[in-house]
Image (cartoon, grey):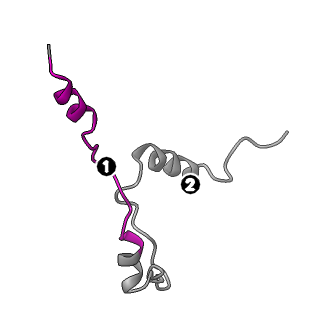
Amino acid sequence: QPSRLSTLFRAAMAKSTNHTAHNQSYKNHRNGIKKPMALGKGQKRSLKGMDPKFLRNLRFAKKWNGKGRSSD
């Protein structure tokens, strides 16, 4: 049978936090939050790292854009 004193200590133990956003906003604003660099003429953003399922659908959408069934 555990003593009364040990149960008091066990109940009073602190819980640690799993996540905090403390100081992150400050760090982000130290050098300013900048807009992404504008692309030059004829350039486009890389599709690397994007969702493969989305990219596959994007290819089909581009391929068949305006070439659907003719309205009869």
From the top left corner, tell me how far across and down residue 32 is, in percent: 43, 85
Quadrant where the image shows the C terminus: top right
Is 43 or 14 nearer to us in this picture?
Answer: 14
60 w.r.t. 10: above or below: below
Other residues around mark 2 within 10 Å, as few (<14) / some (14–19) / many (≥20): few
- Which comes before the other along the chain, label 1 or label 2? 1
Q: Which residue is mark 1?
A: 17
Please state if 11 lies on the left or on the right of 21 as rendered: left
Quadrant where the image shows the N terminus: top left
Foreground disc of the pair 1, 2 = 1
Residue 8 magenta? yes
From the top left corner, tell me how far across and down residue 59 is, in percent: 49, 51
34 w.r.t. 23: above or below: below
19 w.r.t. 41: above or below: above
Q: Which residue is mark 2?
A: 62
The residue shown at (27%, 44%) is 14
Q: Are marks 1 and 2 in contact (CB under 8 Å)?
A: no
Query: Which span of residues is magenta-colored?
Result: 2-25
Task: Identify the secondary structure beneath mark 2.
Answer: helix
The residue shown at (47%, 85%) is 40
